[in-house]
Amino acid sequence: QAIATIQVAQALSLTGKPQEALAAVTEAMDLCEDTRFDVGRAAALALTARIVAAHGGGEDDAELALESAEDALRFFRRAGIRRGEAVALWSMARVEAAFGGPQQVVRCARESIALLQELGESAAEAVVNHTLADGLVAGGDVNRATLAMERALAIYETLSDKKKQASCLHRIAQLEIQGSDPEKAVETMEKARGAFNAVKDYKGEAEVMGTERDMHLQEGRFAEAMRVAKETVTHYHKAGDTKLEGRSLLKVSELLLDNNDVDRAQKVAEVAMGVLSQASDPDGTKDAWEMMGAIKHARVKTEMQQVIELNSDFMHVPKTLVVDPGLNKRIQAAYNESTKKKLF
């Protein structure tokens, strides 16, 4: 029963329910203490650390997570359970990634990987390589982070896990962008899209397209960014996901507005509004209204600028408000002096 409750806690955490997950893992620890199931209690402690690390929190949460990971690690080392030790080290790396420093993340992750390699636990090793990559990126070592993800990719290829291969390729592409190698990143993203398409994961493929779009924008290639953004709309339309189709239309509208194409931005935003309303997406509809407001503001601003430019030859548009105390008094004094000297 304790093991089943731990599995429930893990599932709750993965579905974004941290409070329920912590309640379940606490119940599991109580069950373990009642039955003197020490291994289960240590596993629950390690899971507690990972749940808190995944969902964040304040200083008290960080302290709870670190203490839980350390307690689990001490137990597994004392009991000589090496797989448990590896999992506890990975849990500690996750905690350090959330609350601590990159050096500790790298140290704990590497120790965990070394143990998992000795045990032949390749699937677990691949997972810990993700955490190692996060620590290396946080420490500014993008090249080594890429190598860590490439090792994970090689493991997933050996295991024939197509979906994880796709996710891994996407992460590698993101690291290649960070490492200022956009050409290589484009090639990797093509592989990632193909891999997601092969397992019929249209959301994963669209996420890769979003990365590609943002990369083009960062490089100043607006036309390419717009091409990918439009392709994303078509992608979601074919998949029948009207909510994400509407949101991707809003992204196209945003790009057009940023490029000062107000008329087309408004047309696309209106289409997005209709799609999101039809999809019964209140949050998306609210975003669409906000986009329409931004477009209206941009249109008024553009019209004002046009009026000013058209009348610039015969109208004065003050740039700043000049305040000159005593100016009228000085003018009057100068006038009085002039009349005395009969200058008028």
Image (cartoon, helix red, strand yellow):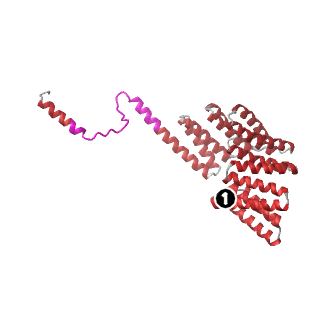
Residue at 12 percent across and 28 percent down: it is: 342
Q: Residues within 10 Å of mark 1 (few under 14, many from 20)?
A: many
**What's the residue at 81%, 54% (across, down)?**
86
Q: Which residues are magenta?
A: 301-330
Location of residue 93 in the rendering, given as x and y in whole percent from the top left corner = 73, 52
Residue in the foreground of this view, choosing between 109 and 221: 109
Percent from the top left, x then y, of residue 189? 73, 37
Q: Is residue 216 magenta?
A: no
Q: Is 309 part of what is drawn in magenta?
A: yes
- In the image shown, does 80 or 332 lie closer to the viewer? 80
**Considering only vertical position in the picture, is 158 above or below 78?**
above
* Residue at the (80%, 51%) spot, across then down: 112
Is 59 positioned to the left or the right of 30 in the image? Answer: left
Q: Residue furthest front?
A: 78
Residue depicted at 82% across the width and 58% down the height:
84
Q: Considering the image in quadrants, where does the C terminus appear?
A: top left
Classify the position of the N terminus by image quarter: bottom right
Residue 306: quadrant of the picture? top left
